[in-house]
């Protein structure tokens, strides 16, 4: 069994479809497991809920636009 | 202390109430801890954010209806 | 699908067996899912890696013995 | 590298800004890492998705108001 | 930013190297992010800490050998 | 209630004590919660289980020493 959790920005369902397929492929190959043993959970975090270097992503973007 | 995280589909508050009570009961009994030492967090994931075998649950359901 | 993560103290395999079976039963019943759709992951945390109220559990225990 | 996940109630962006800055500061100091090596993810859980002692927080609050 | 957590069985460092590189590649491509924005954390769970269908993986393997 | 999970490198108990106390202080202040409502879990990841930019931390360190 392998569970994969991906934290990233909100995205369209096509991006999720690509993530689900491609991540499952590489994880199945690395662990030599069948794809049916892999679960992928995508967690979409708004930019005001994630910080890098102590600065929320929403604030970092606003600064870049100044 | 024990923290329990449950990833599942979106559900009604009655289901959450049952999950909270029953999971706390069995975890408290297994660890021999008082219920007050158990925290349960329910995470509701939409079907387009979870994949099994490389296929998003929302796509798997659509295929079953074809 | 439902993934359940249980953070708790290190325990014997019998306790894990009980947790696995009983948690799967109650989660399957609440979500109306077959047990095969439930994965349980037990994470054993040493007492020096968990804090309650700002105090590591290993220190809290040492104080209680004083 | 250090990733920090904070589960808490829904809050305003000012609270998130404070959490991001202050948590990054103390984690960077404790690990002797530059702030740029610290990622903070805030997860906002509604009161009906968290239970303490087997009781959902939304039900505990309703009882206190009775 | 994207953080990826992979729960799987204990593996050699070559498998981890492959997981790190390939998962980063597909996640960077899907989100259109530079690889430097991707962190991968591999969590190795012993077979007695994971259950599928209510049965610990270590017990399922023992049964298959009977 | 607030649960905080800190992923970082393996460290001494003094560092964990500092993390537990200081993180609890800033989280309690930000959420206006009593410290007793805060749980901190420290997860120590070996350098071969974490990758940044597709490269395991253990390999990045070896390259820097070349």
Image (cartoon, coloured by chain):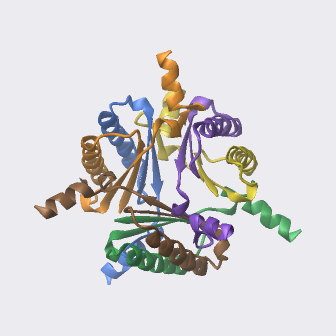
Chain colours: A yellow, B green, C brown, D blue, E purple, F orange
Q: Position of residue B14 (x, y in %)?
A: 53, 81
Estimate the x, y position of residue B18 in percent, counting from the top left. Answer: 50, 81
Q: Residue at x 38, y 61 (%)?
A: C10
**Residue F14 lies in what quarter of the image?**
top left
Task: Identify the residue at the far front of this view.
Answer: E66
Looking at the picture, tell me which residue is in the foreground, E32 or E47: E47
- Which corner quadrant holds the C terminus of chain B? bottom right
Horizontal and vertical percent for residue B34?
Answer: 31, 76
| Residue extending furthest toward the top | F66
Up-down relation of residue F9 to residue E59 (above or below): above
Query: Where is residue C17 shown, x and y percent of the image?
Result: 50, 72
Q: Is residue D6 left or right of residue A57?
A: left
Quadrant (top left, top right, bottom left, bottom right) of the N terminus of chain B: bottom left
**Which residue does the image show at 56% across and 79% down from the upper left?**
C25
**Residue B51 seen from this side:** no
Specify the farthest residue to the bottom.
Answer: D66
């Amino acid at each position: 069994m392998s569970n994969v959790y991906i934290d990233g920005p909100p995205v369209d369902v096509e991006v999720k479809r690509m993530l689900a397929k491609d991540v499952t492929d590489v994880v199945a190959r690395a662990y030599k497991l069948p794809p049916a043993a892999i679960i992928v959970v995508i967690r979409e975090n708004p930019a005001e809920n994630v910080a890098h270097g102590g600065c929320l992503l929403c604030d970092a973007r606003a600064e870049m636009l100044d």
